Image (cartoon, rainbow, N blue to C red):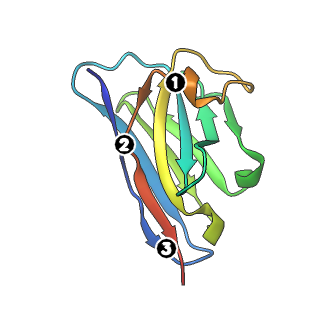
Amino acid sequence: QVQLIESGGGLVQPGGSLRLSCAPSGRTFSSGAMYWFRQSPGQEREFVASINLSGERQYYADFVKGRFSISRDNAENTVYLQMNSLKPEDAGLYLCARAGTWGTTIMRPEIMDYWGKGTLVTVSS
């Protein structure tokens, strides 16, 4: 069973930056499109960013455009989420996920086939 493992979360002040990572554990991971979601207590899981298999195409939720950047290193089987200019409302559990396809309309959690357990981001002074 493939498991995705996120890391890089933590406490940061407003305006600060964090870099999240996501890598598979277990058996060889069949690469696909990768996604970041986030979830706050009492809130539904929401799409943050996605990247296609080659890494050439990315898509972002409006509320992170210009502040977050998704990238991937296929040689290392790792996807990253660089988060800059963090705001208190960016706090939450950040989860990475894999899907077999990528597209600007593909952002529903139920489409993902593998998930990590998340890494917690806290934005507070």
Q: What whole-number distance in Å separates the C-alpha atoms at marks 1 and 3?
A: 29 Å
Q: Which residue is labeled 2 in the image?
A: 117
Q: Using residue 3 as the reference point, say whether residue 10 is left or right of it.
A: right
Q: Position of residue 13 (x, y in %)?
A: 54, 78
Residue furthest to the front: 42
Return the residue at label 3: 12
Residue displayed at 74% across by 53% down: 63
What residue did someone put label 1 on?
112
User: What is the crowding at mark 3: few (fewer than 14 residues within 10 Å), some, or many (at least 20)?
Assistant: some
Residue projecting furthest to the right: 62
Among the two numbered marks 1 and 3 on one chain, the one whose residue lies closer to the N terminus: 3
Judging depth in this view, the residue of 31 and 2 nearest the camera is 2
Residue 93 appearing in the image: yes
| Quadrant position of the C terminus in the picture | bottom right
Relative vertical location of residue 70 with respect to residue 74 in this rendering, above or below: below
How many labels, in total? 3
Q: For mark 3, give the secondary structure.
A: strand
* Image location (x, y in percent) of residue 121: 47, 62
Closer to the eye: label 3 or 2: 2
Q: Amino acid at mark 1?
A: Met
Give amino acid for label 2. Answer: Lys
Q: Position of residue 111 (x, y in %)?
A: 57, 21
Label 2, secondary structure: give it: loop
